[in-house]
Amino acid sequence: PRPAVWPDGYYIPTSTGDHVMQKHACVVEREKMLYGQPAQEICFVIDSVGFLNNADLDGYQLPPDGDPNIMMATGGAQLNDVFSDDGIYYWKFKVDWEEPSKSELDGPHKVKVAEYNYLGNGQLTKTVPQPGTDQRLDSQGDKIMSRMVYRRIGERESIVAVHSVNTTIGGGGIRWYEFRIDNNRDVRLFQQGTYAPDENYRWMGSPAMDKLGNIGIGYSFGGEEHFTGQRFAARCAGDPPGLLTMKEAVLVEGEASQTNTMRWMDYAQTAVDPVDDCTIWYVGDYLKEEADYYSTKIGAFKIER
């Protein structure tokens, strides 16, 4: 599960299983839970869809009262050997706690984007090379990663999403999007980009948007000559569209290869500090020298010229 906060509920998408193309879109009654009271849960079952993520609220400015939560997924279907697509798909999840039977899930609707191919052809795949071993790491390339961020700035409403893709120069890159919600509550693509400045692997990203509209993305970084560590890239709101313009920052360099399993991390996480609504905290994993298990590194960044 990848939980998300919305004014009317905690939204939690889950999976029936790794080998079944069926997902559950659920929401629980936030107001009751905050007071420790018995709370309702509403779920929809969706067939023939990849992993889902719900918009997760950032900042102090709330969405318009009563507006539905937006839920998204990549296209393609790894279980059917379909690893590429040119769309991101979304649903409008409208909950009614007074009359739960009137709750609605409207979708899927396609937003056309630049064509992509899942990094490593999807999840549970041996994709990312490491120094000194034949063991490769899982890319989780079939899904939008946690978190999928909602941010309202004045009358502008944005959703930022990322996933991991194959790149033309041979490594892995971070595909990122900023969507905008229009007056009809439909989702439109505002900008998109793929961050892959060299042939190494950047994957399992987690984005954030601060109160000024600046975007930061933390992610795993590794390759044949680099133990896997954690890095961060960003852009200012007024920069040319589709580019992460600020110099890549290193949160932590990896010190060893992971050899006991291919599964890597599950997952990274960003969070905007509520004190200033600008500082972005990021947490990710790495291996220390001669270690068998992860260590965790937490860092904070501000995006400014």
Image: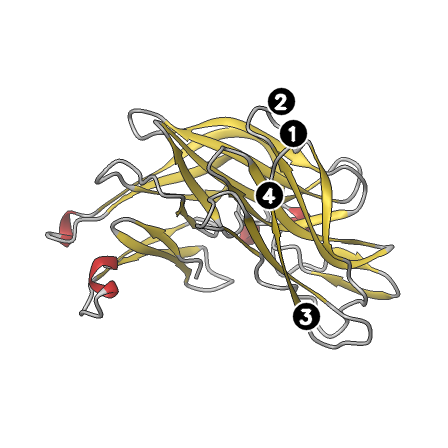
Question: Taking the image as drawn, is residue 86 in sight?
Answer: no
Which badge, 1 or 4, comes first in the chain's sequence? 1
Q: Position of residue 250 (x, y in %)?
A: 74, 51
Q: Position of residue 3 (x, y in %)?
A: 40, 58
Label 4 sits on a secondary structure element that is loop
Which badge, 2 or 4, comes first in the chain's sequence? 2
Which residue matches tag 4? 302
Question: Taking the image as drawn, is residue 265 in sight?
Answer: yes
Asked which quadrant contains residue 214, the reply is top right
Which residue matches tag 3? 295
Q: CA distance from mark 1 to mark 3?
A: 31 Å
Which badge, 4 or 3, comes first in the chain's sequence? 3
Q: Are marks 4 and 3 in contact (CB under 8 Å)?
A: no
Callout 4, which amino acid? Lys
Between 271 and 3, the residue placed more toward the observer is 271
Viewer-nearest of labels 4 and 3?
Answer: 4
Callout 1, which amino acid? Leu
Which residue matches tag 1? 243
Label 2 sits on a secondary structure element that is loop
- Quarter in which the C terminus is drawn: top right
Which residue matches tag 2? 240
